[in-house]
Amino acid sequence: MCVRKNILALLVVAFLGFFAMPVLAADPDGTATLEEDPGTALDFIWVLVCGFMVMFMQAGFSMVETGFTRAKNAANIMMKNLMDFSVGALAYWAVGFAVMYGTMEGLNWLFGWSGFFLLGDAYDVTTIESWFFQMVFAATAATIVSGSVSERCKFSTYVIASAVITALIYPVYGHWIWGGGWLAGLGALDFAGSGVVHAVGGWIALAGALLLGPRIGKYAKDGTPRAIPGHSVTLGILGVFVLWFGWYGFNCGSTLTADSLRISVIAANTTLAAAASLVTAMLATWAWHGKPDVSMSGNAAIGGLVAITAGCAWVSPQLSVLIGIVAGLLVVVGVWFLDWVLHVDDPVGAIAVHGFNGAWGLLALGLFADGTYGGVTGLLFGNVGFFAVQALSVAVSFVWAFGTGLILFGIMKVTMGIRVSASEELQGLDIGEHGMSAYPNFVATEPATEAER
């Protein structure tokens, strides 16, 4: 027994040494960089603080998804969001960052293939800064999927999906746009991720929701959708405000430098698009249903944020309002279309918010870029070619993310299963998946209703 323990200890030491040896000789303090350019420190602080704000968006997603779903699944959704960030950070550290920003001789147009586990770069402060900022974006893409598959997806299945998204699916398309891949070579742009983060997450969410099928009781026998209200509008709207705040880190931080005075324009555009989208959805639901819908308005604010993310540095405040108006209509019409036409059950509206508006954000940049930032102009200012490239990027993001999402969830469906049992779904995933309840003093097990049988 003692010999076995000694052998195990040696193996652990050898394993840790494997990771430590390449980096111990590196200079850990980054002094040389600061001596060359004292302004570097301010840039580092700016990017890292913005990264912290993006990380806090995970709290916003947790609250939106939990508030807009039923109380019996609240702990499960919170656990999925905890897991998304943690598993996402590890998967992006191990594989995703190397695929997205590494190099691959002869195939770099397609994907990167260097820097796995940050080996050799653990004390390269510039690389670490880039990894951290891009990691919080990757975790956001995975979290988008959580809401659309909520209330009926196995937790074990979702863990695997989250790891694959952050390790491979997100980084490959990200490499094509931000890592020097083939779309970037054609001139495609996406300032902070309408396509790279949100459309990719939204289209994977669509694939997952399709293969999972609707929740029990969502549709009547004739196909008419039934509303399944969430348990806390208060929690959901608080999540909207948390996301809105974090989005300034998302968009403004993507300048990657603290001295870019375009930051003020980006902040204004981010605010105006979200506000215009919310007001548009509020008025649309008011006119349609006779009452302004709270949850739809909150979702529309997020949709406006998604839509402006691609072009926030390249368009004017006036056109940001127009982008937001279209985004608000897309959320309202998109939720209706998914519910009534496609019969896709998306409990929190993530597909319309992130998928539809992620695509709109890329197209809006191709339409409205006015040439005042980096000389980028869109179709409205005579650049037909740039709009065509942006439209291509929209198509590629859908084919790649939806296609790989179908493959991922399809493989898991025929191997390990992706959906909980009917009895567990009716009882709530909190008990079945985690052996606990988020509200033990208030929530009782819900029996099947006549409609659900």
Image (cartoon, rainbow, N blue to C red):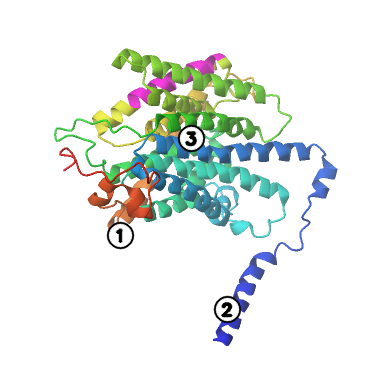
- Please determine whether, in this image, residue 410 is positioned above or below residue 224: below
Crowding near the residue tagged with mark 1, few <14, some 14–19, many ≥20 C-alpha atoms within 10 Å = few
Q: Exactly how many numbered labels are in the figure? A: 3
> According to the image, label 1 marks what residue?
415
Is residue 157 shown to the viewer in this render?
Answer: no
**Res. 330 visible in picture:** yes
Which residue is denoted by mark 3 in the rendering? 195
Q: Quadrant of residue 23?
A: bottom right
Name the residue type under label 3: Gly
Q: Upstream in the sequence, badge 1 or badge 2?
A: 2
Q: Report how far apart the C-alphas of labels 1 and 3 lie in the structure.
A: 31 Å
Mark-to-mark CA distance, 2 and 3: 46 Å
Q: Quadrant of the N terminus?
A: bottom right
Is 50 or 38 nearer to us in this picture? 50
Depth check: give the residue in front, 67 or 221.
67
Q: Position of residue 105 (x, y in %)?
A: 59, 54
Towards the viewer: 3 or 121: 3
Please name the amino acid that badge 1 sits on.
Thr
Q: Mark 2 and mark 1 in contact (Cβ < 8 Å)?
A: no
Q: Compared to 319, does 189 lie above or below? A: below
Q: Secondary structure at mark 2?
A: helix
According to the picture, the residue beneath numbered tag 2 turns out to be 8
Span shown in magenta: 318-334
In reply to whether residue 321 is colored magenta, the answer given is yes
